[in-house]
Image (cartoon, rainbow, N blue to C red):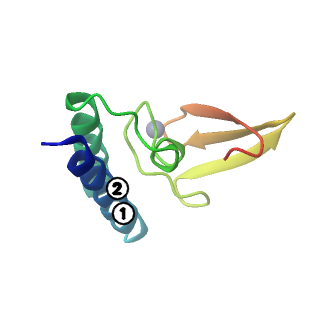
Amino acid sequence: MTRSIARERIDRLHDLAREAARGGDDDLAREYVRLARRIAERNRLTLPKRFRRFTCDACDAYLIPGRNARVRTRAGHVVVTCDCGHQSRYPYGEA
Ligand SMILES: [Zn+2]
C-alpha cells in the first residue's frame, strides 16, 4: 500500500467512524478508529490532526462533544474528556 493510498484510507475511516458514532454505534466507530490507527502504524504515517482531536487515545472511541465527550477551555488549553475518563489537552486555537 502506498502512503498516499494509506492516507486516503485513514481519511475514509475517519468519516466512517464519525458517521457510525453519530448514528449511535460506538462499537462500530471504534473498529474504524482502530483500523485507521493500524494503517497509520504500518505505513509510519502520522494521524491527521482532526483524527487525533476526535478520537480517544485510551479507548479508541470516536468523540462527539455533548454525546460521549465533554469539551472545556481552560487557561489557554482545550480539554476533551471522553466518557471513559481519559482527558486530552490541546493548545487553544489549534483545536
Ligand atoms: Zn475513551
Query: In which quadrant of the rendered view does residue 65 lie?
Result: bottom right
Local SS, label 2: helix
Residue 45 x, y percent position in the rendering: 33, 33
Task: Point out which mark residue 40 bears.
Answer: none
Q: Residues within 10 Å of mark 2 (few under 14, many from 20)?
A: some
Q: Residue at x 84, y 35 (%)?
A: 76
Establish whether ligand 1 lies closer than 8 Å to the Cβ of label 2.
Answer: no
Residue 19 vs residue 50: left or right? left
Residue 4 x, y percent position in the rendering: 26, 48
Along the line of sight, the residue nearer the viewer: 41 or 55: 41
Residue 90 vs residue 75: left or right? left
Residue assigned mark 2: 11
Residue assigned mark 1: 15
Q: Residue at x 27, y 44 (%)?
A: 36
- The residue at the far right in this view is 75
Query: In which quadrant of the rendered view does residue 17 lie?
Result: bottom left
Q: Measure how far apart labels 1 and 2 are at the Cα level.
A: 6 Å
Q: Relative to 18, does residue 74 appear above or below in the rendering?
A: above
Along the line of sight, the residue nearer the viewer: 23 or 53: 53
Q: Quadrant of the N terminus?
A: top left
Local SS, label 1: helix
Query: In which quadrant of the rendered view does residue 41 lie?
Result: top left
Residue 38 x, y percent position in the rendering: 23, 35
Labelled pair 1, 2 in contact (Cβ < 8 Å): yes
Q: Residue at x 61, y 60 (%)?
A: 66
Total tally of numbered discs in the picture? 2
